[in-house]
Structures are given as structure tokens and as C-alpha cells.
Image (cartoon, rainbow, N blue to C red):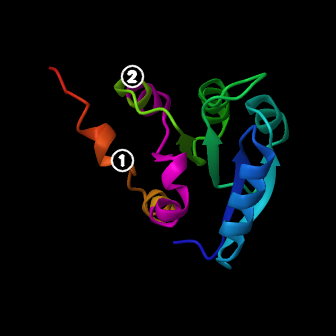
């Protein structure tokens, strides 16, 4: 695993962004190098060192789903974790289809984000069990 994890955050709530940045920076291996208020700003200004994006799904201008599609088209090495309040099965299916490596519910962010980052950076997926149990695999 890399020594440092270069993180970019995208969320339209400035207070949430700042709080999450402060929380992440307590861990010396996390370097929060960029924060965006919407997906378009993230797509247009993504720093070259970023290897992990924490992306809100519902944002103005460009939502997290569209932004992730664009980013992953050109930067397959970047892992993206969705940060959301949505708990519907359709969202999980869409996240997986697009290429998100994980999902954390906003209300659980400070309890789960470290585990989610560790899992994703070790090439494992991280999705809430509550969402996974809603998925049904059909042949």
C-alpha cells in the first residue's frame, strides 16, 4: 500500500467538506489536495496526484455520477468512493456500473470512512451491507 493517499473531495456543502477534510487530516497518510463544490469543478481541476476521490452523488451543475463517468474514462487508476444519503438499490447498481469502488452514507461518514479508504486502497470494494442485501443477482 502507498505511503500517502492523495484525496480529492467533491461535495456541495462547504461545512461538510471542511469537516471531512479536518477529520481526514488527522491521519498523516491522507493528503487532502483538492476540494470541489460540484462534479464539473472536480472534472476540470482534478490534481494529477489524486488516487482517491470522495464524491457526493447529488450536487448542482454536475452530479457525482456524471463526474465519475468522465473521470474514470481517462483515469482508471483513480478509486472513487460515493458519499451519499441515498439508500435505494438503484443507486448501488448505478455506482457499481459506473465503477465506484465504495459507498459510505453521510450519517456514518466518521465511523466508516477510514475502513472504506483502507479497503478501497487495498483493491477491495466497500459498500454498506444494507445496500448489498438489496441487490439481487439475476443470470
SS for callout 2? helix
From the top left corner, tell me how far across and down residue 52 is, in percent.
62, 53
Q: Name the residue nearer the viewer: 97 or 14.
A: 14
- Image quarter for residue 56? top right
- Judge whether residue 48 can be spotted in this image: no
Percent coordinates x, y for residue 31 in the rendering: 73, 67
Measure how far apart labels 1 and 2 are at the Cα level.
14 Å
Residue 18 lies, with reference to residue 44, above or below; the image says below
Question: In front here: 107 or 52?
Answer: 107
Residue at left offset 68%, top offset 59%: 20
Please name the residue shown 52% across and 50% down the image: 107
Quadrant of residue 110 within the rendered picture: bottom right
**Label located before the other in sequence (1 or 2):** 2
The magenta segment: 93-115
Query: Is residue 104 part of the magenta span, yes or no?
Result: yes
Q: Which residue is mark 2?
A: 90
Say which residue label 1 marks: 128
The residue depicted at 39 percent of the width and 22 percent of the height is 90
Report the side of 87 relative to 83 (left or right). left
Q: How many marks?
A: 2
As rendered, which of 121 and 30 lies closer to the eye?
A: 30
Identify whether 107 is placed above or below 21. Answer: above
Mark 1, Cα crowd under 10 Å, few <14 / some 14-19 / many 20+, is some
Give the vertical position of 108 relative to 138 (above or below): below
Q: Is residue 63 left or right of residue 15?
A: left
Q: Secondary structure at mark 1?
A: loop
Amino acid at each position: 500500500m502507498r505511503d500517502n493517499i492523495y484525496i480529492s473531495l467533491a461535495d456541495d456543502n462547504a461545512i461538510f467538506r471542511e469537516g471531512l477534510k479536518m477529520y481526514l487530516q488527522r491521519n498523516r497518510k491522507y493528503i487532502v489536495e483538492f476540494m470541489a463544490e460540484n462534479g464539473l469543478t472536480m472534472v476540470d481541476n482534478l490534481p494529477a496526484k489524486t488516487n482517491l476521490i470522495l464524491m457526493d452523488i447529488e450536487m448542482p451543475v454536475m452530479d457525482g455520477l456524471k463526474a465519475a463517468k468522465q473521470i474514470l474514462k481517462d483515469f482508471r487508476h483513480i478509486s472513487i468512493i460515493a458519499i451519499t444519503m441515498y439508500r435505494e438499490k438503484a443507486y448501488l447498481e448505478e455506482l457499481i456500473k459506473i465503477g465506484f469502488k465504495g459507498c459510505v452514507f453521510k450519517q456514518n461518514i466518521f465511523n466508516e470512512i477510514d475502513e472504506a479508504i483502507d479497503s478501497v486502497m487495498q483493491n477491495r470494494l466497500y459498500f454498506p451491507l444494507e445496500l448489498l442485501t438489496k441487490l439481487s443477482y439475476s443470470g
